[in-house]
């Protein structure tokens, strides 16, 4: 178990771990609608990435 706060959450979870998810993702927040993540040379909404993973 590891406590992650602030920017560390973004780097560790969103940038490093999220792309590796293969089966399940549980989101326990409503604060992702304005979150943008790197995709190639630009930043896109996290919801766009999640939508692509569902297909």
Image (spheres, rainbow, N blue to C red):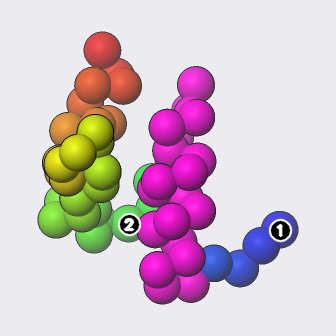
In this picture, is 16 found above or below 31? above
Segment colored magenta: 5-26
User: Residue drawn at (58%, 25%), measured in percent from left and top?
Assistant: 23
User: Residue drawn at (53%, 72%), measured in percent from left and top?
Assistant: 9
Label located before the other in sequence (2 or 1): 1
Q: Which residue is mark 2?
A: 29
- Compare residues 10 and 54 and report the one nearer the observer: 10
Q: Which residue is mark 1?
A: 1
Q: Is residue 47 visible?
A: no
Residue 38, given in percent of the width and then of the height, sits at: 30, 51
Residue 12, given in percent of the width and then of the height, sits at: 58, 62
User: Residue drawn at (20%, 38%), measured in percent from left and top?
Assistant: 48
Quarter the N terminus occupies: bottom right
User: Regarding mark 2 in the picture, which secondary structure is present there?
Assistant: loop
User: Residue drawn at (30%, 54%), measured in percent from left and top?
Assistant: 37
> Is 6 covered by the magenta stretch?
yes
- Compare residues 26 and 50 and report the one nearer the observer: 50
């Amino acid at each position: 178990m590891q406590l992650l706060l602030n920017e560390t959450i973004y780097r560790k979870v969103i940038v490093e771990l999220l792309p590796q998810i293969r089966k399940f993702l549980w989101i326990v927040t409503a604060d992702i609608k304005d979150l943008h993540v790197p995709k190639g040379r630009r930043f896109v909404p996290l919801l766009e990435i999640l939508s692509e993973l569902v297909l």
